[in-house]
Image (cartoon, grey):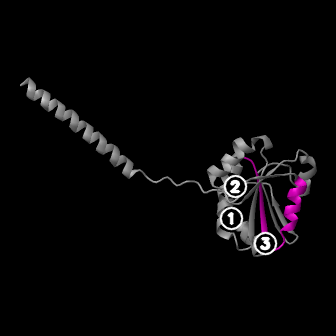
Amino acid sequence: MVTSFGYFGTEIQTMKRVVFAASILLLLSCKKEMKEPAEPENDHIEVVNFQELEKLLREQKEEVLLVNFWATWCKPCVEELPFFEEVHDSLAGQGLKVILVSLDFPNKLESQVIPFVRDKGLEPQVILLDDPHENDWIPKVDSTWSGAIPATLFLKEGKRKFFEKSFTRTSLFSEVSQFINP
C-alpha cells in the first residue's frame, strides 16, 4: 500500500504541475494586448526662447494656429490636453495646426516633459519655452494675460482670440469651430 500511495502521490504532483502549466499558458494566451502610446510626431521637443516662438507664430498665416500654454505640473492643463489632442487628430490637414507650449523648467525636459509627452502619446508639435523674462513676453502673447495657465491663443491672418482658462471638450470644439467658420 505504501508503494501504491507513493505512486499516486507522484501522479498527483505531476497533475498539479500540468494544471499549473496549463493555467499559465491560458493566462498568457488570454492576456489583453496593451496599446502602446503613440509616438509623438516630434520625437524631439524643441526648446526655444520667446523671440523664436514669436517668429513661429507670425509665420502661420493660412491655417488656424491653436497655441496652448501648459505644464506637466498643472492639473487643469493636463486634464484638457486630451481635448487638444482630439482637435489635432480631427482637424489636422484641414487648416488647423496645434502647438503645445510647455512652460516647464528647461532642466525638467529629459526627466519630465519628454516622458510625459511620450506617455500621453501627444502628436501635436510640442515646444518648451525657455525664456526667464516672462514679464516681457507674457503681455506680448496677450495684454490681458496674468501669466496663469492653462492659456490658449487662436491665430489666423491677423485675427486672434485669447483665453486664460481651461477648456472642456465641448467648449474647445465650439471655439475652434467659431474661429474657423466665423
Whole-percent x, y for residue 51 in the image: 91, 56
Q: Horizontally, is 22 left or right of 143 in the view? A: left
Q: Secondary structure at mark 1?
A: helix
Dot 2 corresponds to which residue? 43
Dot 1 corresponds to which residue? 88
What whole-number distance in Å separates the C-alpha atoms at marks 2 and 3? Answer: 23 Å
Q: Horizontally, is 102 left or right of 57 in the view? A: left
Whole-percent x, y for residue 73 in the image: 72, 43
Quarter of the image with the C terminus in it:
bottom right
Dot 3 corresponds to which residue? 63
Please identify the residue farthest to the top as the structure is shown.
Answer: 2
- Viewer-nearest of labels 2 and 3? 2
Quarter of the image with the N terminus in it:
top left
Can residue 65 be found in the magenta stretch? yes
Q: Secondary structure at mark 3?
A: loop
Which of pointers 2 and 3 lies earlier in the amino acid sequence? Answer: 2
Whole-percent x, y for residue 137 in the image: 90, 52
Relative vertical location of residue 145 with respect to residue 94 in this rendering, above or below: above
